[in-house]
Image (spheres, rainbow, N blue to C red):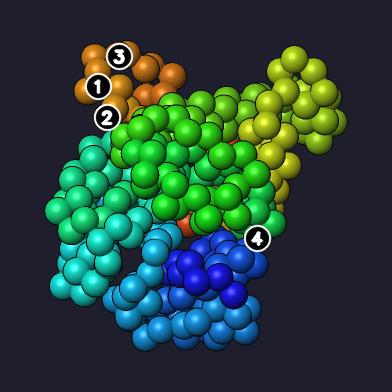
């Protein structure tokens, strides 16, 4: 086992497969508040600890996924924060989408502890995480990237350095999420319209995907949109409230630059309507039920 040690904090749907993947070449420490996830981690060869601080002591890198900037600051600098136990020269690899401002602020605070922040938002689901097939975009100083390289190279099949500053990764992911959020909303409208026009939804989806109107998001979310009206809805692979958060980041960033983004703003409202209708915890494909609350053609 390598002498390079990495702590993975949060062993959920993405954290556990990433931690398991990292055991192929590194010594992996893990922590999660769920005893069940800790048991699964131990079975996978991950050394588990009873707190995030204990898991982070003396490691070379910390792999961190949080929901927002508030959680990021709490994990690092809160009452049980880990910043105080990280050794100088360690790196914190931040894989979430929280926005440029929060990452820049946190990077400056970590620098006061002699710790680097590697801004490394990623794309890909749990299966790809376990296979080391993630897309990771990195914004960090060269020395920080080099220190994080063993972690990033094990997890990524596509690893792109987008800039030398913490925050550059977030900037790129903001642009990426603008397109993803708009594409999902457009797919929902298109499939809802097809059904209202009396077309077979499955045949329409298959034919669209083969032509110029096809896109990854249409092919990926489209089948789940066709399940959204079923009892229980589609399998939850990406929660709707993630795009409430991410489109909020997009529109805030656009306003800060004075750039009009009418399509992003419209998509954001669609996700907000879904959340207001109680669909926050459903798959984001459930936006089709916001566009068309009932299935089938209009009557009358």
* Labelled pair 2, 3 in contact (Cβ < 8 Å): no
Indicate which disc residue 130 carries.
4
Q: Name the mark nearer the viewer: 4 or 3.
A: 4
Q: Of the residues under marks 4 and 3, which one precedes in the sequence?
A: 4
- Answer left or right for 32 relative to 223: left
Query: Would residue 119 be found to the left or right of residue 157 on screen?
Result: left
Image quarter of the N terminus: bottom right
Which quadrant is home to the C terminus?
Answer: top right
Q: Which mark is residue 134?
A: none
Tell me, for residue 252, which label it has, or none.
Answer: 2
Q: Are marks 2 and 1 in contact (CB under 8 Å)?
A: yes
Task: Give me the residue at 51% from left, 26% from top.
Answer: 179
Res. 185 visible in picture: no
**x, y (%) of residue 26?**
55, 68
Q: Please report contact status of discs 3 and 1: CB closer than 8 Å, yes or no.
A: yes
SS for callout 3: loop
Q: Which residue appears at 30% of the width and 57% of the height?
A: 89
SS of the residue under disc 4: helix
Question: What percent of the width, then of the height, locates residue 168?
Answer: 36, 32
Q: Which residue is mark 3?
A: 259
Q: Which residue is mark 1?
A: 255
Q: Could you say which is closer to the camera, residue 260 or residue 80?
A: 80
Asked whether residue 125 is in view, the answer is: yes
Q: Is residue 85 above or below residue 272?
A: below
- Dot 4 alpha-carbon crowd within 10 angstroms: few under 14, some 14 to 19, many 20 or more: many
**Marks 3 and 1, how far apart in space?**
6 Å
Name the residue nearer the viewer: 112 or 228: 112
Q: Is residue 33 above or below residue 156?
A: below
Q: Position of residue 113 (x, y in %)?
A: 18, 58
Q: Nearer the viewer, mark 4 or mark 2?
A: 4
């Amino acid at each position: 086992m390598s002498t390079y040690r990495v702590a993975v904090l949060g062993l959920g749907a993405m954290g556990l497969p990433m931690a398991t993947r990292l055991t192929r070449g590194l010594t992996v420490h893990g922590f999660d508040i769920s005893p069940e996830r800790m048991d699964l981690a131990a079975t996978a060869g991950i050394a588990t600890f009873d707190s995030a601080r204990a898991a982070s002591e003396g490691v070379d890198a910390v792999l961190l996924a949080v929901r927002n900037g508030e959680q990021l600051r709490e994990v690092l600098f809160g009452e049980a924060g880990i910043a105080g136990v990280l050794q100088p020269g360690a790196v914190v690899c931040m894989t979430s989408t929280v926005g440029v401002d929060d990452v820049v602020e946190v990077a400056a605070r970590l620098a006061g502890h002699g710790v680097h922040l590697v801004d490394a938002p990623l794309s890909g689901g749990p299966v790809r995480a376990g296979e080391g097939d993630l897309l990771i975009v990195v914004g960090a100083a060269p020395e920080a990237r080099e220190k994080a390289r063993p972690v990033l190279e094990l997890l990524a099949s596509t690893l792109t350095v987008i800039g030398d500053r913490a925050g550059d990764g977030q900037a790129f992911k903001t642009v990426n999420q603008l397109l993803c959020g708009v594409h999902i909303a457009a797919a929902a409208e298109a499939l809802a319209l097809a059904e209202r026009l009396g077309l077979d939804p499955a045949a329409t989806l298959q034919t669209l995907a083969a032509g110029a109107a096809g896109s990854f998001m249409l092919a990926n979310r489209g089948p789940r949109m066709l399940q959204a009206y079923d009892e229980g809805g589609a399998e939850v692979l990406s929660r709707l409230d993630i795009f409430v958060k991410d489109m909020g980041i997009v529109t805030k960033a656009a306003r800060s630059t004075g750039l009009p983004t009418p399509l992003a703003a419209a998509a954001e409202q669609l996700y907000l309507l879904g959340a207001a209708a109680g669909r926050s915890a459903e798959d984001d494909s459930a936006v089709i039920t916001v566009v068309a609350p009932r299935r089938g053609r209009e009557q009358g």
